[in-house]
Image (spheres, rainbow, N blue to C red):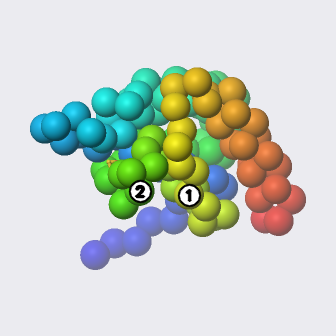
Amino acid sequence: MKKEELNSKLEVFICNHKRDNQDDCFHKGGKELTDNLKKWSREKFGQEVKIFRSGCIGKCEEGIAALCYPSKEFLVNLTKMDEEEMKRYIEEQNQRFMKES
Ligand code: FES
């Protein structure tokens, strides 16, 4: 095993899990939300913020769900309409953890 340190200060994992019955974060718009935030984040923050597409994070009833580090917060009941609110959250979190590091 080899360990590598992340060079980002903030990571957001957005569930993109797919189920056969389509009751999942992917079909609620998780992929579109992830793709849009990844593109925005890369342009705005470069390597400081990472947006990851994730598998199920155990909040299926409340999907679209996301998990954020280092705040260790779940964001739930997200919709495609929450993109601007997510951007504000990421900006706030990035400023908070920039000050602490
Ligand atoms: S399907 Fe998204 S949290 Fe389980």
* Residue 61 visible in the shown view: yes
- What x and y, as percent, mark residue 52? 45, 44
Say what amino acid the circle numbered 2 marks.
Answer: Lys
Task: Judge by depth and name the residue closer to the eye, 52 or 14.
Answer: 14
Q: Secondary structure at mark 2?
A: loop
Give the Cα distance between marks 2 and 1. 9 Å
- Looking at the image, can residue 38 be seen? no
**Identity of the residue furthest to the front in this view:** 61
Residue assigned mark 2: 59
Vertical comparison of 62 with 41: above or below = below
Horizontal arrangement in the rendering, residue 71 relative to residue 68 (left or right):
right
Pointer 2 and pointer 1: residues touching (CB < 8 Å)?
Answer: yes
Report the residue that reaches farthest toward the left: 20
- Rendered residue at 63%/53% (across/down): 10
Residues packed near mark 1 inside 10 Å, few (<14), some (14 to 19) or many (20 plus): some
Is tag 2's residue or tag 1's residue first in the polypeptide sequence? 2
Q: Identify the residue shown where x is 58% and y is 24%.
A: 81
Most foreground residue, 17 or 77: 77
Q: Secondary structure at mark 1?
A: strand
Rendered image quadrant of residue 70: bottom right
**How many numbered marks are there?**
2
Is the C-beta of the residue carrying label 2 under 8 Å from the nearest atom of ligand 1?
yes
